[in-house]
Every structure is written in C-alpha cells, then in structure tokens.
Amino acid sequence: MDDGTSEPNWGVDHYDQQSETNPTTPGTRSVPVGAVTLPLSTGLTKDTWGTRDHTVKVAAHGLTVTTTVNGVEVDSRTLAGDQIRRHGSFGFGGGTSATVRSVKVTGTGAPDFSVDLTTGANPFENGIGTLAGLTFPPKNPFIPSKNSVLPIANPAPVLRRAFTLPRGRRIAKARLYLSAAGNVSFTVNGDPITVDGKQADRHRTNVPRLLTDQSTYDRTVLYDTFDVTALLEAGGQNVLAAELGRGWYGVTTPQEWYWQLAPYAGQPRLRAKLVVTCTDGSATTLVSDQDWLSTDGPTMFDSVYSGEKYDARRADQLGHWRAPGYRTGRDWRPATVLIPPGSCSSPSPKYHGALPATTVPDGFKPAVLRAHEAEPVLVDRTLRPISITETAPGSGTWVLDYGQILTGFVRLALTGTGPAREGLTLRIRGGNRIVAGDGTTASPLSVEEENFQHDANLQTHYYTLSGRSTQTWEQQFSHFGFRYLEVMNLETVLGRAPDLTRDADVLTVGVARSGFARTGTFTTDNDLINRLQRNLEWAERNNLVQKPTDTPSREKNGWTGDAMASSESESLTWDVNAVLTNYLRHFPDTQISTGQLPMFVPIAKGGYGYDHTPGWNAAWKAVPAWDSAYFVIPRELYTYYGNSSLFAELYDHQNTLLTYYETLFTAENDYTFEASLGAYSGAESPGSNAVISLAFYIHFCDYMDEVGRRLGRTERAAHYATLARTLRKAFIANYWDAAQGHFTQGSISSENTLAIAFDLVPGSDPGADDPRYLAGAKTVAENKKALAKLLADRIMAADQHIQNDMYGSRYEFNILSEYGYTDVALKAVTQTGTPGYVHQIAKGATSLWEQWTDRLSVDHHYRSNVATWFYQSLAGIRPTSTAYESLRIRPYIPAAAVNSRVPTSVEETDLSPATLDHVSASIDTVRGKVSSEWHRRADGGIDLVVRIPYNTEAEIWVPTRDKPVTVPRGAAFVRNDYSGGAAYAVYRARAGRYRFNAG
C-alpha cells in the first residue's frame, strides 16, 4: 500500500455492547483494538511508510492476533473474552487513505478469497477502483467514521423452486403475491413477471423494477400481486426464480441518514405465494419455504447509493438457473427460512447472523403485510449517448453524455470480447454534470459525483467480464440519477477507442419513473416557457420513483417538505393519486410516541430525523413547513381525485402530531416556536422561521377542524377550531406591522404570501369576535390587495427576479394573477440572471436545481410548482369542487413582452422579447378531459376554445376588453366581471366543446 497521510494502525472487529443504539437492535461496531509502533527491523519510518508498497498480514488464532508488515512481526496480543466476531467481514478502517493493490483472505472456514485490484475490480463497499489499485480517499468530514467492508460472503442470493402442475388440467388463472424486504428480480420459467400479465415486450417496458417498494420495515411490509397465467406451463415442469438485492432493507453504505443503523436492517428476504386455479376449480398453492433452493448469485454487492458489482464469470458458472430443466449443483442448498421483518417490544437477544423461523425473540411483533397500491417502477424509453469523449488523451477513461438528466437503469451490451478479456472490470460511474476540465492532458474532464453525504462510492457500478464473446447486463437493485456516465477500462474491453457510431448501444439507459399515467399537457408560443415546462416535467418524473424524492442521486430520500411544495403541480401533469397515497400511508409508521414526524418518509427510526438523534440537528423537534405534507397532500388528493380515504385513516395520527405541537407553541411563549427551518431556498433574507411555522400550524388546525367535522369527530373539530382562533389572533398580534401594513419579520414575500393563502390577513370588517379583527385597519380585502401589490413590488424592485421560497412560490404566482399582476409573474418566470429559472436553462439545465445556483443538486423538483400557475392562471383551468365536479376556466392574459428564446449561455441578454399570444393546456381528470386554449389575434382580441367533460359544470371566463363576444350554442351568459383589473364575460356550460371569439 502506498499512503501519503496515514500512520500504521490496525483493528479487529469485536463486539461492543455500547453500539446498541436501540434496545431492539442487534449489531456490532468495528473498533481498533491497537495502534502499532513499527520496530526498527522493518526499516520503515513515518516518512517512508507513505512512499513504499507494503504487505500487511493479520493472523487470528483463537484470541491471539498477530500482525506482520513486510514479513516482520510488529505486534502480537491476546484479546480478552469473546471479542473477535465469529461472523462478519474484512475491511479497512473509516478514513484510511491508501491505494490497495491486492487482498487475500484465507483460513476463515469459507473458500479462500483473493483479488487483484489493479484490474479495476472493487469487491469492497468503499473505495474507488482504478487500474493503479483500489484507492481510499481521505475521510469525508460529513460522515461518522465507518469501515470499508469487503462483503466476502454477501453477494445477492438467487433462489429457485421447481414444481410440476397436474396433467390434463387447463389453467384458468394464476396469481403471484410477491413481497421482499429489499428488492427482488422475479421470473416464471425464465420470463420476467409483467404488470399486464403478458410476455415481456421487446423493450421490457411492462416489466416492473425495484420490487417491492420501500417501507418502514419494522412496522409495514408491502406486497404486489401479478397475473402470471400466461407464463406457466400446464401439465409440465415450471420454475419460480428470484434474485434478492439489499434495497432499503439492508443498506450498509455509510451515509448521513444512518440507514445502516435501521432497527430492522438485515439480509434481504423473500415472501412469495403462487396460487394456480384450474378450469375444473382445483388449485395448486406454493409458498416461499424450505423447498426452495438457494446459492450465491453473480451480483456480488448492491447498494441503493453505491450501485452494483456484477461478476459475469459467476453468471456463467450458474448458467440458465431460472429455466426449467436446470440441474442444481452442490453449491445449491435449501433456502433458510427467516423470521419476517418486525420489531421487539422488549430487549432482544443479540444475534450475529440470520434469525431462523424457530428462533423468535421475546416480544417480537411481525410487521403488517399491506397491499401496495402504487404503480410499480417501469422503464418507458431507452436513451443512447449523444457523445463519447475521453477525459484526457490516453487516460483510458471515457465520458458518455446522454443529453438529459434522468433517473434510470444502466444497460451494458458487449460483443467480440472473448477469453482474452475475462477478468477485466469496467467501472461505470454516473454524475449530473461536468465540473472541471476541458479534455486536455493538463485539464482532464471530471464528472461530478455530488458525494458530500456518503463515505463510499456513489452511483458506481463494477462489471467483471467473463470469457463469453457476447455479454449483457442491466442494473436491477438500484436506480441512478445522472446525465453522464464515466467509464474506466472501456477502451481495453473493446480493444479500441470507443466510437459513437459503432458503440452507441454498448451503454444505453432505461429511463425510469413510477408507472403512473401522464394526465396534463401545457404548451405556448414562447420557446423559453416551453423549455421550462419540459425541464420541470423531467424534474418531477425523475423524483417520483416509488416516492417523491429530493434528488435521485445523492439522497433518494422522501423529504416531506419537498413533496408538499410540488404535489399540486404534479397532480396536474401526472396521475399521482396512488403514489402519493402510498407515500402518506408511511407517515404514521414513522411517528414516535411523542407524536413527532421526521422530515423524510420512510426513515430509519432512531438514526436520523428525530429530536437528539445523530445527523442534521435542523431535523430535530417539529418543522411545520415540512410537516405540511401530512395535511396539504391529503386535501389535494381529495380535491383533484376525490380520494377521501386518507381523512379517516390519518386523522388520529395527525392529532397526535398536533398534540406534540401544543407543547411547543404555548401561551407562555406567545405561540412563538423557532423551528430550525421555515422559508427555504428563497432569495430574501431568512428570519421568518417562527412566522412560517405558526402560519402552517394554523393551516393544519383549519384542516383538522374541517376534516373532523366531515368525519363526525365533533369534539376534536371544535378543539381545533378554538385553537385556530387563538393562534390566528397571536399570529396577527406577533407579526403584523400596522405602520407598514404587512408582515415584516424576515422573508417578507414568504410571510405575506402564506398570510393570503391561509387566510391570516387582518382587517376592520370581520366581527369583533373574529381573530382577524383589527380596529382602525383597512378591510381584509383591502389588506390582501395591498399585500399582493407588495409581492409584485418586491419582484420589480429586484430587477424582476423571483423572491419567494419554495413554499411561498407554490402560492405566489396564482395570487399575483388573481390581483392583476400576471405581467409581473410572467416577467419573473422569464427573467435572466439569478435568482431565476432562465439562468438554469442558460447554464444547460435539463431539469431543475435545488438552489438558484448550481451549488448543490441539479435535479430537484420543488420549484416545479410554477406549473400550477401555468395550468391554473395562464390556461385558467381550476376545480371549484371535488374532483372537477365543477370547474372554472379563467385565463389571465398577459400584455407584457417577455423573453421568449432559449439561451445557450448566461452571457446572452437579448432573448427576443415578445408577447405571449398562445397558451394551450389539457388535464385528464377523473371525469374526463378538460382543456383550455387561447390565441391572441392580430387585432388584440382573444379566441378561447374549451372542452368540458361529462358530469361537470363549468364557469367560463372570456377576456373581452369590454367588446362583444361571439358565443357558441350551449353557453349561458351569467354576468360581466371586472375583478382583478380585467374585463371578463362569464358563461356557464356543461359537457362539450365551446369556441368563444372576443373583441
């Protein structure tokens, strides 16, 4: 090993009772038990240690551990008690900085292990595989010290169950009920299961991925049901086969969120049940039991964060193990039957291996098995690289650009390899941007890894070749978020430099998202707005894999505040009813006895996200802006889809959370609680956390009052109605500045936007018993109008740049249009520079960013909420009752000339200003398609065409400029309206297509 920073030290894994972070959690911690002073006989000093290669050998005989360096014994000691772990793995201490060229492990009782790391191979969980060896960079300061683990005995297991169906009987139907703690790739007779019950199509777009969905495994495990009738052979031999990945159940990659310390963490496990019903009424049932056979598969390691390590040589050894007629060898053994995921109500024995079914800890409670209602993850298209570039001349490392930030699965297809390439390893690393270099020897290209929250590789695959001439592989136990793939050893494997013309199919990408339908479309005659719409749609789909995530690369966590910020815009473009319902059903599982809800869901309880747990202290206590998802999204699912099921299901759990809030917001502190986060990712100065938190708390109480009355929970509803009155009064008393006529604590735009949206604006016109009553003030309506003007003025004063945070912007744009400031909103959306969307586009963004600069993630979705304004204000489509039973179409027509051309660099300032003269939008609602399309004619008049679905009544607002309107048959005039500063003629209509010509 050559090492420029570390001094020699060593450790042996031993059991440490203090590592028990939860009384129900068995586990061990790797602890260095000694530090070595090198004897003179080694000829080494501190300086020469870091400049030479060394061979370090650690031999354990019983409790005696002997260490030699370059053949010289440097230490021997006997450990006391049962300190050496009998089960575990070999590795390097966290923070080691070194390049390791080879590793050999013998005498463990298992087969000997040996690897030459100069081939690019990396069987370790950590480290970066290079042709110089396996490099361990200096310690990541954000991550607690963890070990680099060599999972010698932990490749992904493969399982098979052969069986014969009775002869002479026809299959009527066959259903497979499938659940996995972790991930499972499942086949029937060698064919993958599908979502439509048919054979897999050519591009496998009907094959579900990442089964089964993540949950809080100690409380709930999900299962999916599949029709496998077409895959079975009546009267013949059949085979069920599965390969298991660790998924979210067995994360071992060290990272900030402590998934590796989850109380349920363990080896992946499968639960399956097949029921075959014949036409004569007879049935055959198979379950996952000891009749299945198992062995180690070719996926040597997998991690939702780090990626996968696949050894094609092992795949060749196994052969066609998924097919009928396969002969299992001696390495196949009966599957181990494990207890299901669950939890213990009392301290459990400390196990260091599989928990067999007959050894159930005292107080064990199995997790509830629940049907998974969300659509599975699917691949809906394949992308090929648009360029292949060497990072520097002669580097042997190549960058493939796919032209779009995406979420997906890497696919490898090699031809012409053969025995000479056997044992070579490709390293395939995904990243979202090129962060350095111009491709010269002096300045090589570098693909960004965005890896500041992990102590391991991020988004990196290792594929070791077999001797076959044709080889294929596809990522299956993780998903990556990326635009670029950096590939090491590609030239060596191909035997030549890669070429885009010949090698476009060597590494392709299956683009993934949860399999919900697209429901909305939005287009204009402004290319810049259309590009923004495209980018935000990619941001949403990239971050809706199984759950709403904050980034599909670095974190993949279901942050609640992010989910709430864009849930409404997602409900307009996609059918997210099922995926968001499934997400919300995880919330109660993550609450602890105090009622506290973590900031992302699901979560590893006890490791992160609760008061005084490790990790980010901003996640401690209540964070109302993030908890908003618990209340806002259920109401939206009811508004847009008519889904009321969550009201009763969540109400008691929401009540528990708000009971916890009552201990934080008290009369003694004037209902002021300074949450760690409030206005987030805004342009204005922070300082509004207490204001934002109380505003959301009041909004939650209004929800509990409204929903409680709907459910007949009158006592709770009355409690929250009273509490909301008290809190509103305190909000106005604490934060309203009467002299300035608005809320003034810090993030002015966010505070005043939420005040309008949540009905927190005071005035002199409510009755004296109304908490909003403020003697001597303007009316509520006048104050709201003044606050809307304030929002517009702040944008204009900031050179027409967006000022609001991710929560305020969810509401602000619609408010601006409702009060006559559509031009201001449109200018802010299309303005160059920062903060703003156009700056991202000018920098080459194909998704949306976490911040207004590209300092952090460049694939975030929460700023996609501007799409709500596109649909509801520019196109004017908005429901006025549940599930579009009634709706309003009121397009706000801008007059200003705004930027319209897509920039190619931030230096461009002339983006062809033009008026917006055409907007078209449609939404496939639960009642049918509703659409709105308007054109501005050369004379300035507006042509408006709308489509109303059946069982819906619409109010159509036609912009008139106070001029006559040509009215279609079936549209009944209601009134003229001048609210919002523009003239409209209002009509009422039912199902049909209507064309209005105004002015």
Image (cartoon, rainbow, N blue to C red):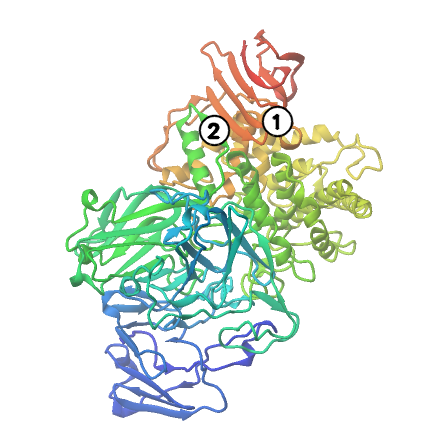
For the point 24% across and 77% down, the residue is 51
| x and y, in percent, of residue 810 in the image | 57, 38
Q: Amino acid at mark 1?
A: Glu
Residue 892, quarter of picture:
top right
Q: Residues within 10 Å of mark 2 (few under 14, many from 20)?
A: many
Q: Nearer the viewer, mark 2 or mark 1?
A: 2
| x and y, in percent, of residue 348 in the image | 61, 76
- Residue 847: image tag: none
Disc 1: which residue: 818
Horizontal side of residue 89 vs 502, given as left or right: right
Residue sitting nearer the eye, 431 or 586: 586
Horizontal side of residue 612 vs 293, given as left or right: right
- Residue 522: image tag: 2
Q: Residues within 10 Å of mark 1 (few under 14, many from 20)?
A: some
Q: Which image quarter is the C terminus in?
A: top right
For the point 68% across and 49% down, the residue is 650
